[in-house]
Image: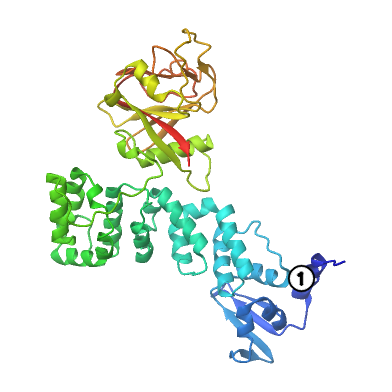
Amino acid sequence: MRTEFYSSLSQNFSQLLEDADDYNVTIKVGENQNTQEFHAHSTILRARSPYFKSALSNQWANKKKDGMILFTKPNISSPVFTLIIKYIYTGVLDLTNVSSSDILELLVASDELILEELFKHVQNYLIEKEAVWLNQNLVKVLLIVSKLASCKQLQDYCYESICTDPEPFFTSKEFTILDKDIFLELVKRDDLGIEEIDLWDHLIKWGVSQTPIIKQNDVKKFTDANFRDLKKTLDPFISHIRFYDISSKDFFYKVRPYRKILPLALFEDIMSFLMAEAEPQHKRLPARLSSYSDLSESKIIRRKHATILSDRIHYKDTSSKFSKRNKYKFQLLYRGSRDGYDINTFYSKVNGQGQAIAVIKLQNSEKIIGGFNASGWNWNYNYNYNYNRNANYSQDHFIFSFGENYEIKIGKFVSGTGLYYGYNCMLVFGDGDLTFNGGNGSCVQNSYDQPILDVNSFVAEEMEIFSVQQL
């Protein structure tokens, strides 16, 4: 019978680290005023770390003083090396109350010291336990982990997070210092979930910041030298931009002013395609894949609207922190201008399709309103009109409105009628909180905790219904 006493072994080695007077290695970590010396035993270091096994061999020249082997590691901070030396001696790692930045530094240090077991654990820990911090610091993290060949898992996580929800990354303060190779890797990806014209805007912003000769952002004031240097900066990216997916209006106002950085033949080809619908002569890259299927058909919402709504559906609370953006498939079921506003046609399109989102574009306004039907429309044509029988009280229903800059206002179901199906109405959320039957509608707060409009009535320009399924 085999018995293992690892716990007591770990405790004894911990005492050896703290109290032994027979150490023969001194390791000085940190720099400037933040340095600290650690005492260790070469035998243990060599047994636990291939790095130290080589560093302490006779072939590696070591500084010695009075028989003591001296190491200097200014690139590792004292708090991080404290975690490392304890792990080396005891096999114990306690990340309680350790800052996210120090955990990332621990990952880099464990890679340098070839502590594979520790490296794998810390990489998984960052993804599983520190995802919120990672998503808030993607530029910083990618700049570091992109240099670590063995860190592919975390690299992939960062790229996938950016592709799922690019805006926080591209609008961060650190974006303009992003490494060219990292940015190029993103621009090449077919799954980067961003409108092509928005990607172009970010590319220009990054390119201008990376081109020292350019001292202003007004393209009308660019000199020929400015365009020449900007073209050199952005040349690797141009062939990966899906210019043919940009609208003629956006191309005219946002791309055409920078035509000097595009190859002339490409520019003429795009203009022919946009103005005369001529077949492209240059290779046309496929449109970027969206996690939100069929949004290309929508006349109302864009990817960012879908991202915000997906988080609200998944977490039931706009204040919730998320570890990774949730991907949902949005499939267009009904459009008023296409299918008409006949009530029977409406129910034939949306009945039995599962949970769904209704969105309404207000006339002469950028405002979008709507509601999430958590149970889906299930109107039975054989029912007689019966208010109570057709009422759905799910707490997961919500109504919402979007402003011009994607600001969302959520109305949470509190009491009364959550959702009502009726033979004379398309949308009835609550006891009048959102009512619509083609053309006109009303929003009078009753069943939800706040109104989504400042007025009680509205005129619609368009209405769409999407089924919503998590991928």
Question: Which amino acid type corresponds to the residue marked 1 in the rendered image?
Answer: Ser
Q: Quadrant of the N terminus?
A: bottom right
Q: Residue at x 32, y 16 (%)?
A: 342
Give left or right: position of 236 versus 2: left
Residue 226 versus residue 307: which sits nearer the camera?
307
**Residue 285, placed above or below residue 312:** below
- Which corner quadrant of the image does residue 298 belong to? top left
**Residue 367, placed above or below residue 392:** below
Residue 152 versus residue 66: which sits nearer the camera?
152
* Scheme of colours in the image: rainbow
The residue wearing badge 1 is 14
**Residue 431, placed above or below residue 140:** above
User: Which SS class for mark 1?
Assistant: helix
- Among all residues in the image, which is located at the extreme right? 1
Number of disc labels:
1
Residue 131 image point, x, y percent: 53, 52
**Residue 305, placed above or below residue 113:** above
Please say whether residue 307 is visible from this viewpoint: yes
Residue 8 image point, x, y percent: 82, 67
Residue count near mark 1 (Cα–Cα under 10 Å), binned few <14, some 14–19, many ≥20: many
Please say whether residue 79 is visible from this viewpoint: no
Q: Residue at x 49, y 10 (%)?
A: 387
Give left or right: position of 127 versus 347: right
Residue 68 image point, x, y percent: 68, 88
Q: Residue at x 36, y 66 (%)?
A: 181
